[in-house]
């Protein structure tokens, strides 16, 4: 158990509304990630963070922003949700970046977002 | 850029029979390779990884995977399938240099029938 909590676990919202998903970890890991999972696409990286206030884009970052003001929290924001952002969102952490680590990820339980 | 292909959307096997879930990869360098499993309404769970050394890697729940550099493959195997192995399986790859992001395949659904 990597001590990852995602909230909310389920959310239904309307097109054009802002949405923020929260990922909280209890073990002080430096690297945190947001992925989305869609049928036929597997998992695709949205954004990742390598430290407080240090973030970078993944392969599907358009329409998403992130913030990391504390080590333990990584927030994903949809400024104006669209139906194409209906998905299951997963937060993950890794030990990558230190010698001897191999980059395997540990995932939260997911947040299912429906945009109507 | 690295990529992963899982050529089968679904694999069906009878309980007690051996199973194989296929994965091929493409990287411009030496890879780290991973398998994950996802049960319904859950996050992904790490199963096993290949870093270096022995081409046959053993992981959780009796699963193993064989790294084949010449065929750029990393197939997941189990000698005797269980109904409880039914789940979605993902292969993933990253380069073995510095910080590299993990790239996932599209997943293979394994159905084990009683």
Image: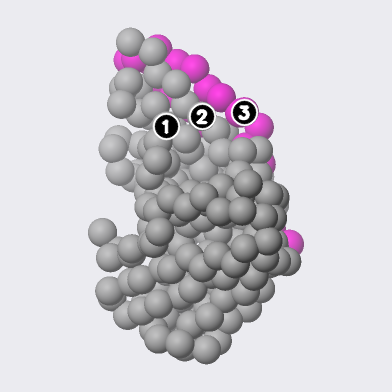
Chain label for disc 2: B
- On screen, residue A89 versus residue B41, left or right, reads right
Q: Could you say which disc has been placed on residue B8 in the image?
A: 3
Q: Does the magenta stretch include residue B27?
A: no
Give the residue at mark 1.
Answer: B87
Front residue of A66 and B66? A66
Q: Does the magenta stretch include residue B7?
A: yes
Chain label for disc 1: B
Q: Give the class, few, some or many, for how many residues have Cα within 10 Å of label 1's Cα (few <14, many ≥20).
A: some
Name the mark nearer the viewer: 1 or 3. 1
- Which of the 4 image quadrants contains residue A111? bottom left
Q: Could you say which disc has been placed on residue B109 in the image?
A: 2
Q: Do the residues labelled 3 and 2 touch (CB within 8 Å)?
A: no
The boundaries of the magenta stretch are B1-21
- Distance from the alpha carbon under mark 3 to that under mark 2: 8 Å
Front residue of B41 and B78? B41
Percent x, y for residue B7?
A: 66, 32
Q: Is mark 3 on a helix, strand or loop?
A: loop
Q: What element carries label 1?
A: strand
């Amino acid at each position: 158990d990597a001590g990852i909590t995602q909230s909310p676990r389920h959310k239904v919202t309307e097109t054009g509304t802002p949405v923020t998903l929260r990922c909280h970890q209890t073990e002080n890991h430096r690297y945190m990630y947001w992925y989305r999972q869609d049928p036929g696409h597997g998992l695709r990286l949205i954004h990742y963070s390598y430290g407080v206030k240090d973030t970078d884009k993944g392969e599907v970052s358009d329409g998403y922003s992130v913030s990391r003001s504390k080590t333990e929290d990584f927030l994903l924001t949809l400024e104006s949700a669209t139906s194409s952002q209906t998905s299951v969102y997963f937060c993950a952490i890794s030990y990558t970046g230190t010698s001897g680590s191999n980059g395997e990820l540990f995932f939260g339980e997911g947040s299912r977002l429906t945009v109507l | 850029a690295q990529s992963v292909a899982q050529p089968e959307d679904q694999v069906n096997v009878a309980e007690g029979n051996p199973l194989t879930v296929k994965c091929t990869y493409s990287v411009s360098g030496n890879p780290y390779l991973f398998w994950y499993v996802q049960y319904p309404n859950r996050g992904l769970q790490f199963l096993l990884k290949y870093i270096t050394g022995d081409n046959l890697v053993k992981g959780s729940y009796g699963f193993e995977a064989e790294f084949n550099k010449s065929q750029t493959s990393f197939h997941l195997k189990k000698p005797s399938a269980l109904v409880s192995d039914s789940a979605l399986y993902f292969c993933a790859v990253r380069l073995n240099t510095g910080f590299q992001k993990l790239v996932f395949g599209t997943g293979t659904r394994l159905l084990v029938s009683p």
